[in-house]
Image: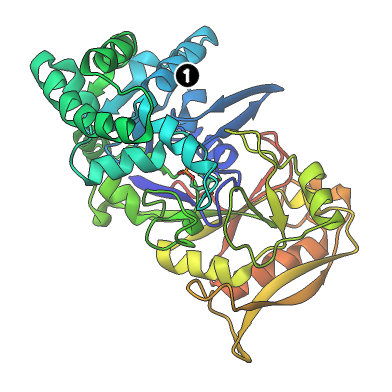
Amino acid sequence: MAAIIVVGAQWGDEGKGKVVDLISAQADMVVRFAGGANAGHTLKVGGQKLVTHLLPSGVMHPGARCVLGAGVVVAPEILADEIATCEARGLGVTPRLLISRRAHVTFPFQSAIDRAANAGPRSIGTTGRGIGPTYSDKAARIGVRLGDLVHGARAADRVGALVEVWAERARAAGVTAPTVEGALAWVAPYMEVIGPLLGDASIAVDEAIRAGKKVVFEGAQGTLLDLDHGTYPFVTSSSTVSGGACTGVGVGPTRITGVVGITKAYCTRVGHGIFPTELLGEAGDRLREVGEEYGATTGRPRRCGWLDLPALRYAARVNGLTALAVTKVDVLAGLPEVPLCVAYRLDGVETNEFPVDDLDRAEPVFLNMPGWDASVSEARTMDALPETVRNYLREIEQRTGVEVAIVSIGADRDATVVRREVLV
Ligand code: IMP
């Protein structure tokens, strides 16, 4: 039996898609537990590219059952479209897809207000996918769950409760108010696709674990975007950390056998919010161009900076990481030196801890590591990696206390060094 959680250890976009895809090759089940269509997983296999926002990366593997847990928020039009795209590609996803009937639904009026808020003075710079409003309505207990929509009377009642509040908001904002009939008519064609796939994700996952299957819980976004533990208020609205897998699916923590954190060899962030190791100017532009750092969901240029080890150490703690996967090591090739943030200085005192509540006052402390050349991408074993890369990885391990199990040195599936299998 193996039930591992894979989480982003930074601000998202760490290359989870590639790593989960790689691990999923041996998985029986791949489960999304939080977030929604704000995520964007770019999967590259044999020169083919597939971007998914809601479906787990396991869709690429015909042997893997794919599950969306209760903690996910679903944009029905995007999910229906992704299912159709996968079917058109011959991935045969429908018979192996299970969607929690407890997952909440995002309606167009929720996305519209999210996008409108991005233009305001207190903008978070969201993906505009209605994530914040959907989770807010869920917490306010006026949300609509997918399972509500397959029962006529309940659908009208639940959508009625939501629309009542939103009609009031629309009137105040001077925009067209949503109606129950309009919302139900909008969602109906998507529910024809999604309705037959609804079920109890908690039971399905429990049964798989009991049967000794290999289960991967696939995180979305990253630790520093977590609603409780991230760089609040510049965060997403869900639990992106490993604990979120338990609440988001309905699986007990004692069932989990390992937690893998994904980190880039450097750092990126999309949207607003503090980013202490950010590189403004040419060095940042270089990372963005070489690393193709543009959002998979919004196309926005990502902010780039050096690797932040106190932040990674923080991620190791709040997630209970048992292994690390370091991605995009190839992007740094050609630099004579690679600065690593190894500590922070706060009120004149140096600390190894990530000062998550005082980042505006903290100053990163850097250690310059010798760089490496493009030959890094040819390595397929740890020993074949340039010595400078091995030193860089050793520094990461020593300062986080977590072993680097996987090193990614290119976008394709085979451009990877697997030092230790993690799905065991
Ligand atoms: P939201 O999740 O759309 O509400 O956006 C909140 C913050 O999280 C913004 O800064 C987004 O840029 C960021 N964010 C959300 N999803 C992702 C992701 O998948 N990758 C990176 N950043 C994300």
- Residue 341 versus residue 59 in the image, above or below: below
**Residue at (52% x, 42% y) in the render:** 118
Q: Does the rendering let one see residue 267?
A: yes
- Residue 62 versus residue 20 in the image, above or below: above
- Residue 244 versus residue 218 in the image, above or below: below
Q: Does the rendering let one see residue 75?
A: no
* Residue 353 placement, left or right of 247: right
**Depth check, front residue: 177 or 154:** 177
Mark 1 CB lies closer than 8 A to ligand 1: no
Residue 163 lies in quadrant: top left
**Depth check, front residue: 396 or 25:** 396
Residue 227 lies in quadrant: bottom left
Q: Of all residues shown, which one is farthest toward the left?
A: 153
**Depth check, front residue: 423 or 33:** 33
**Residue at (37% x, 27% y) in the render:** 109
**Depth check, front residue: 37 or 180:** 180
Looking at the rendered structure, the kind of residue marked 1 is: Glu
**Residue at (34% x, 37% y) in the render:** 72
For the N terminus, the quadrant is top left
Residue 344 percent location from the top left of the image: 63, 80
The coloring applied to the image is: rainbow
Residue 213 percent location from the top left of the image: 33, 37
**Residue at (53% x, 78% y) in the render:** 353
* Residue 392 placement, left or right of 396: right
Q: Residues within 10 Å of mark 1 (few under 14, many from 20)?
A: some
Residue 86 percent location from the top left of the image: 50, 15
Reading the image, the residue beneath label 1 is 82
Secondary structure of the residue carrying tag 1 is: helix
Total numbered labels: 1
Residue 13 percent location from the top left of the image: 59, 45
- Residue 145 versus residue 125 in the image, above or below: above
